Amino acid sequence: MDLDAYVIAHGHEWDRLDVLTRRSRLSGAESDELIDRYQQVATHLSVIRTAAPDASLVSYLSSILARARNRSVGTRVTSWRNVGRFFTEVFPAALYRLRRWWIGCLLANVVVTAVMIIWLLDHPMVEQTLMSPGEVDQLVNHDFEDYYSTYASSHFALQVWVNNAWVSALCLALGILGFPVIYLLFNNILNLAVIGSVMINHGHAGHFWGLILPHGLLELTAVFVAGGVGLKLFWSWIEPGDRTRTQSVAREGRTAATVALGLVVVLMISGAIEGFVTPSGLPTWARIGIGILAELAFFAYVFTLGRTAYQRGQTGDVDASLLEDRVATAS
């Protein structure tokens, strides 16, 4: 790369960012421009470091970016703008782009769970090897329902959110290894299949589905999203496509971070449903209806906002504009 030509081509953008960082007060438009210029100059710095490293120029741009970062952090308008953009563009676009992975994960887990429940119902003797008659009676008549009403709704909702966030975080964090994700998901659905078969086998099918479905639809979808995205991260270094393995893993890793942040809110919603709706006195049809509405709202979110953002070029890569990727290396 011809460094002198690059400086001539982009020097005015660096100067403009420098000017913005030194102003004592910025208008709303100037605050937005500061963020845009920051992203541009960060990309330029990445290119220079890779293609034509020059110590003085790198130091100059780094100092400008540091001042810009300090100016933007804590700016309320910018913060809320970024939060809004994250939930209307970045997160839904990530879900839409990776939809085949997490929907495939969801369908596979539903099928395996159904097969296990049917098999366990056809082999009732297996139940005796898993639980004693006393444990079965305790589960069917007490423990399963008491689980949803033992604690105050607010405390229980928080407990559920923390637990499911932990499982989802593990799926994403261990995704690069692949097999731990499968292990986590299998243990999750195995527990569901065993409890479901016991409840159904002892005449409590309506009770079981009435307590599981209100929150379980959205909750398990979130877990399967984490599992599917984790498996995509694993596949990114097996089959990197037209990127290097490092670039492929970096991109999917950043997208996994996007999904992790977004799922925090999704799991908060499912936790709230489990804490306040599942144990409520509402009729079973109403509780299940709330769960179905929450699930439909999630899919509508993905296939409306997500598809629109994806078609505009958003991929869910929260830092794609700041890090070297195919666009940067081609500049």
Image (cartoon, helix red, strand yellow):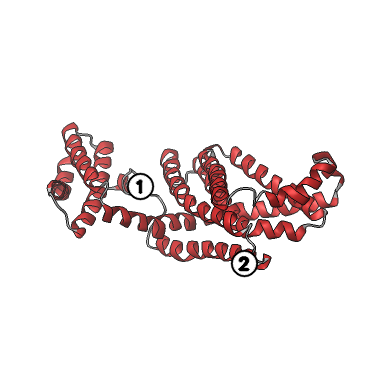
Q: Which residue is mark 2?
A: 289
Label 1 – label 2 distance at C-alpha: 38 Å
- Identify the residue at the far top of this view: 55
- Identify the residue at the far right of this view: 125
Q: Residue at x 31, y 57 (%)?
A: 81
Q: Secondary structure at mark 1?
A: loop
From this view, report whether residue 128 is shown above or below residue 282: above
Where residue 145 appears, x then y in whole percent? 70, 52
* The N terminus - image quarter: top left
Residue 8 showing in the rendered view = yes
Quarter holding residue 59? top left
For label 2, count other residues whose C-alpha is less than 10 Å away and answer few (under 14), some (14-19) or many (20+). Answer: some
From this view, report whether residue 89 is shown above or below residue 329: below
Where residue 111 appears, x then y in whole percent? 70, 54
Judge left or right: residue 49 versus residue 101: left
Looking at the image, which is closer to me, 316 or 270?
A: 270
Q: Secondary structure at mark 2?
A: helix
| Residue type at the position of mark 1 | Asp
Residue 294 badge: none
Give the number of callouts. 2
Where residue 23 appears, x then y in whole percent? 12, 49
Q: Residue at x 46, y 52 (%)?
A: 262
Q: Earlier in the sequence, mark 1 or mark 2?
A: 2
Judge left or right: residue 60 versus residue 279: left
Judge left or right: residue 11 versus residue 144: left
Residue 116 showing in the rendered view = no
Q: Residue at x 70, y 49 (%)?
A: 192
Looking at the image, which is closer to me, 24 or 49?
A: 24
The reply to whether discs 1 and 2 touch (Cβ–Cβ < 8 Å) is no
Residue 319 badge: 1
For label 1, count other residues whose C-alpha is less than 10 Å away and answer few (under 14), some (14-19) or many (20+). Answer: few
| Residue type at the position of mark 2 | Gly
